[in-house]
Structures are given as C-alpha cells and as structure tokens.
Image (tube, helix red, strand yellow):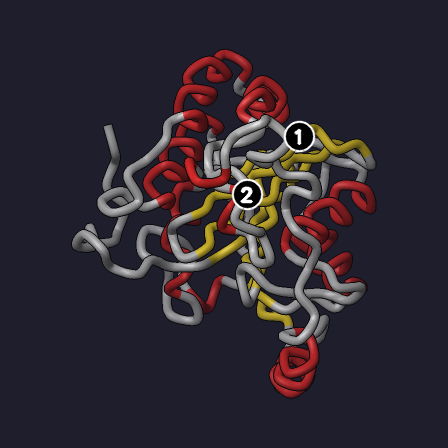
Amino acid sequence: MALPLPGTPHEPEGAAGETYGAALVSTTDGATRDDVVDALRELGFTGWIAPPDGGWIAAIAEPGDGTVASGRRGVLEVAAALAERLDTTAFALRVRQDRQLVIAAWRGHAELGRYSSDPSREPGADDEVLGAPFGTEHADAFAAAAGRPDAAEELAEVLDEELDSDSVFESERLARALELLGLPRWLVASAALPRDIPTGPRGRELVRLGAGSPGVLGRVRGRVAASVRRRMAPPPAIADPPRGDDLGIDPWLL
C-alpha cells in the first residue's frame, strides 16, 4: 500500500515528479555537522547540510541527480567519500523525476550495496536494459547499516515491488524505506529547497555551500561550477545493469 508523502499533496496520475538526492552520515561514530561541512567543503560540494536528526546528518545535493562536487562526483560518490573520510556509515538516496529510486550504502571505504528501482531510466541506458528493481538482495545490508536489522525482510519487499509509474511515485517507496530504516522522512520533500522543507528543517537551520564555499562567495562559485558540471554527468548508479540480451530475452518483449 502506497503512503502519502509527508507534508506534500498527492500528485494526479501522469504528473511529472520531483528529482532530489541526499547523502546521509551517521553520528554513531562521533561525526558532527561541522565534520561533515568541513569534508564537503574539501569536496567542493554544492547543496545544503541539515542539523542532526535521529542520529543522521543529511547533505541535500543541488542538483539531486547531477554532478555536485569535484571529481565528477554525484550524490553517490559524495556519500562514498564522506564514509571513507569520516570512517563511518553513509547512505546515498536519489530520486529521478519520481520514476527511479537509487539507494546505496558504505561503511568506511567498503561499499555495502546498491539498489535501483529501474536501471532502464539511467541516462544513457539502451533499450535492452531491464526496468525491474535491481539490488533488492542488499536490503539486509541496508537494514544492518541503519541499525534496524529486524526491518530487512519488510524492506526487501518494499524494494522489490514493481510500482505502477502512472499512479505511484518513487518518493512513496522511499518514504516507506526511510521509515523502516529510521532515516529522516522529510527527505522526500527536500525538492522544496531553497524554501523551507515541509515537516523538515527550516531554511535558516541549513548550512548552504556553493562549490564548497558558504555565503556570497558560495553563491558565485556555485553558479560558475554549475555551468561546468552540468556538462559532466556523474557515473551511472549501476555500472553493469541487467540486460535482456544477457538473459536471452527477445528485445521485442522488453
């Protein structure tokens, strides 16, 4: 059963959805927001950093599905860098036009797993890339990383469900996953930025960085960096997605 997005109205069928992405850093190992901000400044990150919430610090990327830091890093690469630099657990969450959900997790330098609800919606994917959920087997690792091992079975069911994209948005799947993992549910409304996030932190509570710099300098550097970064897409979320030709499936059936 699909859940409504907290703080946002349900969109009519066929409506275009939102795009957003965030890296979440665990505070369990002692990481503070200052630590996260310092690391993101070194990475040349553009986006907002929220105060700690339920043991997690969220860095909301701008844009959610593009290159947001130096080294052609998207939100997944930023989360991986934060996990390694701060030697802690980090998640990456990304929703593209509410038609694709990507979840990935790291512990220190080790990647724990990646999931995509629809690899065929990745930019550059050809017609033979399958559109079914991929990486559901990582639900156990995701649940353990979030400190919710008992949620693994239900999370796997949520991730494995094939949604009707004409009537159900991927933000609804994400809202269910966030609840099971104990992660901040207001992230599904983070596309509201730079306005206040419904049910989440207010704009004045967030630290804003533009290409790693705060304040007026950050706004200027962020605009310059954005003009360059939009021509450099980050790596695909799933480097080797499942393909119909690998499985012997007739392309006409895809």
- Residue 201 lies, in percent from the top left, at 42, 56
- Residue 183 lies, in percent from the top left, at 48, 36
Q: Is residue 120 above or below residue 217?
A: above
Label 1 crowd bin: few (<14), some (14–19), many (20+), radius 10 Å: some
- Taking the image as shown, residue 137 lies to the left or right of residue 202, namely right
Q: Amino acid at mark 1?
A: Gly
Q: Which quarter of the rendering shows the N terminus? A: top left
User: Which numbered circle lies on residue 234?
Assistant: none
How many angstroms separate mark 2 from mark 1 (CA)? 23 Å
Instruction: Give the mark nearer the N terminus: 2 vs 1.
Output: 1
- Residue 248 lies, in percent from the top left, at 58, 27
Which residue appears farthest toward the left when viewing the image?
A: 12
Q: Nearer the viewer, residue 246 or 132?
A: 246
Residue at left 30%, top 61%?
16
Q: Which residue position is annotated with label 1?
A: 113
- Front disc: 2 or 1: 2
Q: Tell me the element at label 1.
A: strand
Residue at left 40%, top 57%?
97
Q: Amino acid at mark 2?
A: Glu
- Residue 253 lies, in percent from the top left, at 42, 36
Q: Which quarter of the rendering shows the C terminus? A: top left
Callout 2 touching callout 1 (CB < 8 Å): no
- The quarter holding residue 92 reads top right
Q: Which residue position is annotated with label 2?
A: 128
Q: Nearer the viewer, residue 140 or 248?
A: 248
Q: Is residue 75 above or below residue 140?
A: below
Q: Tell me the element at label 2.
A: loop
